[in-house]
Every structure is written in structure tokens, then in C-alpha cells.
Image (cartoon, helix red, strand yellow):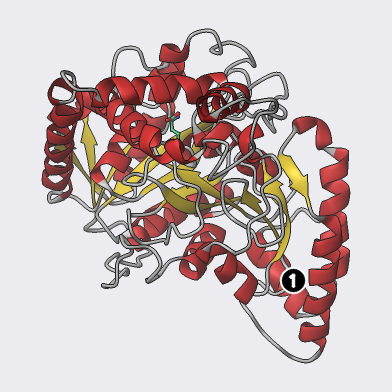
Amino acid sequence: MIKKSLLEIKRDLAEKKVSSVEVTKAVLAQIEKKSDLGAYVTVCADEAVAAAEEADRQIAAGVDKPLLGVPVAVKDNICTEGIRTTCASRFLENYIPPYDAFVVKKLKDAGAVIVGKANMDEFAMGSSSEYSAFKTVKNAVDDTRVPGGSSGGSACAVASYQAYMALGSDTGGSIRQPASFNGVVGLKPTYSAVSRYGLIAFASSLDQIGPMTRTVDDCKYVYDIIKGYDKNDSTSYSGNLDLGEKFTSLKGRRIGVAKEFFPSALSPEIKAAVEKAIAFYKDNGAEIVETEIKSFDMALACYYILSSAEATSNLSRYDGIKYGRRAEGCKNLQEIYYKSRTEFFGPEVKRRIMLGNFVLSSGYYDAFYLKASKVRTLIKKDFDEALSKCDALICPTAPTTAYKLGQKITDPVEAYLGDIFTVPVNIAGLPGLSLRCGTDSDGLPIGMQLIGKAYCEETLFSLARIYESAKEAK
Ligand code: GLN
């Protein structure tokens, strides 16, 4: 396996130091070797080798494209034409999309070689990737632990060199938290910056696709390829997506910290690591600004109400008739619905459907859904206010490092609490980037999160890059 960053391998390919077929075969061999980690639902070896051969032909002919010949992975809730897209659900076990998602088209246009579809929590609901209907994903650093979720397969694949980049999706933390658990970089872009066309919906007002990579520069590189307006996504933004700033010095930069980011339940090791990163920024010239997000502690409840309500509605299409598989031996319409949904949805998805129906039901709608919608506005306002005083906010990505497999499976609320730092960012529609900032006493990666203003991803990349290169220099 060629242990290089995406940009390094891209350069080697362009300079013909190595061929795409060689690189792709090496990645496929690594996937085989690491198959116990469960990172992939589907490995498309034949298609990948064929795409690599085509890339090599193009490279020989002098063609240059941003990802020409580079092996990448795509989360299994993002549609790939002709390649099974299951959402890690029994319901879509045999679903082969007739079209590519916008982002997949972008990757293919850029010459990327898709090696497989990354495993995940069913329908992206979960934080540990243990809710895949097919197999559990394991952490790339310690295989007795969870990789985080729901993009656990994507994070694991990148961290264990089973791809040079993987796309994930993030509704409430599903890119950033697994990135933090596996020690890689993950970006949840500003809502509407990356098209959701072809992303199988969980909660449409929160879902975003983003890159997971080993370095900050790789992350930016891929983000620039997949972002952009798409007429097929009604929420896609047609304005300027580049409002951020590129800089290499921290002089004059302001980084916001809020006391809400350090609750008493936070692991002391994580607190210390993030504080050390804050000290790094300060020592290197940035000004640390005290801010507050008063509504911070309402975000988790707000998120689980809104996301479940939207999920209930989005998942109603899986009825055994219009979408997905149908249970056998049904005598009437009612039975088709009932049996198909009972047999093919897993426990966490059922929990969200019940939660969502409850908060939307007559008599509870005002108390839950409507109230949460108002809280959403409040959270957005608090973030806008805090960010008006600084370039970015910094906080932990998750309150713990990767926990043991099985540890939270019997206590879903405990798992929901782990999303405390990530869900507010989706609610506010802002960009969030997770980056490794340390290691705990068990040798597990600790992640920090940089939160920026809308369409200011470049500012986050600049801040992250300065930190990353200083750590590398050590
Ligand atoms: N862990 C969160 C949830 O289960 C976030 C999931 C996601 O971002 N897709 O809802």
C-alpha cells in the first residue's frame, strides 16, 4: 500500500512515477487485507480497475484532471450509477441507482477511480456505525472500538489507507465525529454549498455531503471539486461560495471560544487537548475572543426533534411498493406496508420514525416541532452573533474519544449526547471542520472542530493548515 496523501499520489500519477492500475490494485489489496474492519459494503474491483486503465490511457495521452486515476470511496447513501447503493439497509439491499449523484458525477468528471461504497449506520442514523444492517465497522486505530458514525466506513477507509479520500454525509456530525474518532480530517460544508442531488435523504434541511481525508490540503482540494450550484437541488446556492480567506499568518486573526464548549461532563483529556490547540493559536499571533452561544444546550433536543420529523417524512416512501424491497407472503396492501417496514428497517431507524411521528402528531406538533423550529432560529442567531466577533469558533468535535464496540448500543440517549458539539453547526447551517489535535491515554485520536461563517470554508482550511503544518514540523 502506498502510504501517501491524495495530493502526493495525484502528483506521482501525473509524473508517471506510478500507474493508476498499480495504485488502484494496491488499494484493492489493502481493502482485502483490512476487510475485518468492515469499512465497505460494496467493493467494485472490476469497475475500479477498468476506470484505472482508462485513467492511465488518458495520462499517457497528456490529459490532466484533478483526480485522474486516484482511488476514492463514496459513502453508501450516495447514488452511484450501476453500483449498488444500500444505505446499509435491508430495504435497499438490492438497489442499483440508474443515475449518479451530483458529487459522484463531479468525482468521475475529475477522473477519480471509485473503489467502493463505504459502510455506515443505516440511513445515516447513528454515531457508531454499529447500526449497519450488514456488518459493524471498526475503528482504524483500535479495532475493539467504534469508528464513530454514521460515516464510520468512510473514516475508517481513509485512516487505514483503503482509499485516498472518502465522501461522507453529515446531518448532525456524521462526517466530523468519525473523522475525529479515526484521526482524519472531515469537513461538513455550509448548507447548500454541495448539492444533495443523489444523496439518499435523512433530514433534508440538515444533510450535507463533504470530504474525509488525511490532510487539510486534500480536504480543500476535494471540496473545491464537489462544491457548486446544481439546478437539481432546490436548496443549492448559486451565489459566491468563496467568502473565506486564505492566509498563512495568524496575526490579526480572531478565534472565538465559548464557555458552553467546555461542559463539566467533557473528558478532561479532550478539554486539555483543545485548550492546548487554543494556546497554539494564541501563541502564534491570533487573538482569542470570549463569546457565548446561550442556546447551545438546546441544540441536541432541537436536532433530535427536527431531524426525526424530517426522517419520518423522508422514509415514508419505503413502503414495499414505491421504493425498496417488498416482504413476501403479504395478503393485502396494509400487510405489504406493515411487513416490509417491520422486516427491512433496523432498530435505530424505527426509533427515529416513532420519534418523528410523535413530535409531528396532532396535539404535540406545537409543543415539539414548532417549538424546535423556533429554537433553530435562535441557535442560528447566537452563532451569527458570536461569529460577527471572530473568524471562527473552536471547540471539541466530540465529548469522548472512540468508545468500545457495544458500549452504547443499549442506551441510545447516551449515544445521542455524544452529538452535542456537532449538531448545533448543522442547525445553524454553518461549515465545520474536524482536525486531530491530540491523543488520549489509550492512544486514541482527539479531534477539535473549527466552525466558520457561511461559505467561509477557506478560512477554516487556512486555520487548520497552520495548525497541521506546525504539528508536522515538530
Ligand atoms: N449521530 C447523529 C444522528 O444519529 C448524526 C447523524 C448524521 O449526521 N447523519 O442523528
Residue appearing at x 64%, y 71% in the figure: 108
The answer to whether residue 262 is left or right of residue 136 is: left
Q: Residue furthest front?
A: 331
- Which structural element holds mark 1? loop
Up the image or down, 142 lies above or below 323; here it is above
Up the image or down, 156 lies above or below 457; here it is above
Quadrant of the rendered structure where residue 141 is? top right
Residue that mark 1 sits on: 69
Residue appearing at x 82%, y 45% in the figure: 31
Q: Position of residue 90 (x, y in %)?
A: 66, 32
Q: Residue furthest top?
A: 410
Up the image or down, 445 lies above or below 145; here it is below
Ligand 1 quarter of the rendering: top left
Q: 108 or 183: which is nearer to us?
A: 108
Q: Position of residue 158 (x, y in %)?
A: 66, 47
Up the image or down, 23 lies above or below 448; here it is below
Three-letter amino acid code at the position of disc 1: Gly
Can the viewer see residue 235 in this picture?
yes
Quadrant of the rendered structure where residue 351 is? top left
Q: Position of residue 61 (x, y in %)?
A: 79, 91
Can the viewer see residue 249 in this picture?
no
Asked if the residue at label 1 sits under 8 Å from ligand 1, the reply is no
Q: How many marks?
A: 1
Residue appearing at x 35%, y 12% in the figure: 265
The answer to whether residue 209 is left or right of residue 63 is: left
Q: Position of residue 383 (x, y in %)?
A: 18, 42
Residue appearing at x 64%, y 66% in the figure: 7
Categorize mark 1 by other alpha carbons within 10 Å: few (<14), some (14-19), many (20+): many
Q: 470 or 11: which is nearer to us?
A: 11
